[in-house]
Image (cartoon, rainbow, N blue to C red):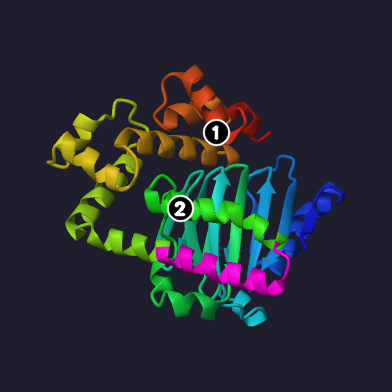
Amino acid sequence: MAVTQSTTHVNAKERLAFWQDVACQTYVRVECGLISDHSFSAQLVQTDIGNLKFTDHRCSTPMQYKRLAQGFREDSCSDFQLMLLESGHVHVTQQGRQAVLGAGDMVLYEASQPFALDFTTPHKALNFKIPHHLMSSRLAQASDLTAITLRGNTAIGQMAAAAIRHSRRLPELPTSAAQNRAGSALLDMLTTAMDMELNHQQEVPTRHQHVLATIKQYMIANLDDAEMNIERIARKHNVTCRTINRLFALDGTTAIRWLWQQRLNASHKALCEGRFKQVTDAALNCGFSDFSHFSRAFKKAFGVCPHTLIQR
């Protein structure tokens, strides 16, 4: 049976506190924070699939969730969470790693360790809450997979995402025994997909990972350079353009697409935090020179025009 909780009938001033209670009761004890002061609404639908808890939640604004060490004193939950992001963007940080997700990507994180979820846009996500013993019995190294992006554009990722989307129909099975069997089979498939992804990532040479990380750090440090291109990046790091393209292909993207997204994310964050009073200043600071193009790309990425985020 599905249980729906929504802010629709909650007073606007009480919505954040209400939503924090919903998040703590449904997932794990966390602290919630709004990145933007704009109108906030959210909804969560929860169903049980055997021993798994499935949720479909959506939120109209950027949002942060933090699981801090002090939360363990009040809540000893150690369950794993597997999230499929249906729309929006989110950064997931845990154990010194950070996964950056776009629509269609997945990530695993666990409640027994501090974590942070930073949704930088309005968003919609599907989530599985998986008991620790069920996950670890299938995937002994599950903790090594937390905060690592499982791309939705790979064969493995597409298979896992399709299974998660279709699982919302499993509660319709006629008996609890059938639901338990279906939930167990689903978890087998998802853990197999994650195990395959871990093995694939371990096959990427360590040197390549280091070079890619260095290039990304350089690009982020120079977001304001509107003239940055592949050729300049290649010269700076003594590699060929082909090498850069190959390294980013391992990440399921291209260098320019990745740079473009970092610029959009940085401009969105700056506007939400009120660091600029003019949209053009934020755009220039993040390397955009064509303001009309910037506005169109911003609205496509985040669902709002940049000027609506100016803090007044």
Give the CA separation, mark 2 to mark 1: 42 Å
Residue 294, can we see it?
Answer: yes
Query: Where is mark 1, residue-wise?
Result: 276
**Residue at the location (41% across, 21% down)?**
289
What span is colored magenta in the figure? Answer: 173-192
Residue 13 higher or lower than 38, as above or below: below
Identify the disc placed on residue 104.
Answer: none
Magenta region includes residue 184: yes
Residue 264 higher or lower than 117, as above or below: above
Magenta segment's dominant SS is: helix
Which of the 4 image quadrants contains residue 66?
bottom right
Identify the disc placed on residue 159.
Answer: 2
- The quadrant the C terminus occupies is top right
Q: How many neighbours does mark 2 have within 10 angstroms: few (below 14), some (14-19), or many (20 or more)?
A: some
Amino acid carrying mark 1 in the image: Phe
Label 2: element kind:
helix
Sequence order check: which comes first, mark 2 or mark 1? 2
Q: Nearer the viewer, residue 307 or 241?
A: 241
Q: How many neighbours does mark 1 have within 10 angstroms: few (below 14), some (14-19), or many (20 or more)?
A: some
